[in-house]
Image: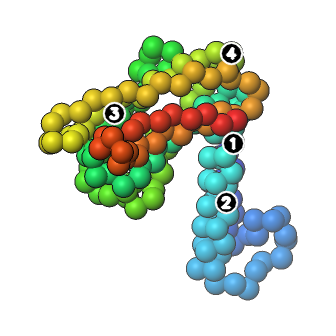
Amino acid sequence: MLRIAAVSLLFVVLLGGSPLGSAEPENQPISSDLEDLKKAMIDLKRDLVILEEDLLYPASSQLAVFLSMDVGEFFELDAVTLKLNGKEVAHHLYTDRQVDALFRGGVQKLYLGNVKQGTNRLTAFFTGIGPGGRDYKRAATVEFVKSFEPTYVELSIADSTAKLQPEFHASVSD
């Protein structure tokens, strides 16, 4: 239905009419009308994306999982797998550029989805190269109670200089 409205708006502008329903022809060149149409289409697309996210992931069941890294001298990240209540919901393989972006302070959204209200368990499996150049696989688990508000889980990888090992943490915020 929205596509029909957008196409109708395009035809009205291209045929010389005003998109606002004015009976007076405008004295602007067609390129100006096309620019106005592009701006209207961008605004419409933005509104559609927001509406779609609200419909697909309502706040009462929304869960978002983010990943951040600190330093990274003891661990080279290759992949992350997420399991929610025992079911795999996300898996991501990392390129060197993505890992570099995380080292420079970037945060990655790993998962956005729905979860039942009540007690839930999220487990993240981190795979990579650990101290001594050996294969390294660790997990971080967090249990949380889902309420009516959106829930956010932050997964973080940090170096422990005292243990000379990487540490994997999961924390929940509502």
* Amino acid type, mark 2: Asp
To which residue does mark 3 refer? 126
Q: Amino acid at mark 3?
A: Phe
Q: Distance of mark 1 from mark 3, alpha carbons?
A: 33 Å
Residue 54 horizontal/vertical position (percent): 69, 37
The structure residue drawn at horizontal position 73% and vertical position 69%, both measured from the top left corner, is: 17
Q: How is the image coloured?
A: rainbow
Task: Name the residue tied to disc 2.
Answer: 43
Identity of the residue drawn at 46% across and 42% down: 156
- Report x, y in % for residue 45: 62, 53
**Which badge, 3 or 4, comes first in the chain's sequence?**
4
Horizontal relation, residue 113 to residue 131: left or right: right
Q: Nearer the N terminus, badge 2 or badge 4?
A: 2
Discs 3/2, front:
3
Name the spot of residue 64 as percent of width and height, x first.
57, 36
Task: Check disc 1 and report its element: helix, strand or loop.
Answer: helix
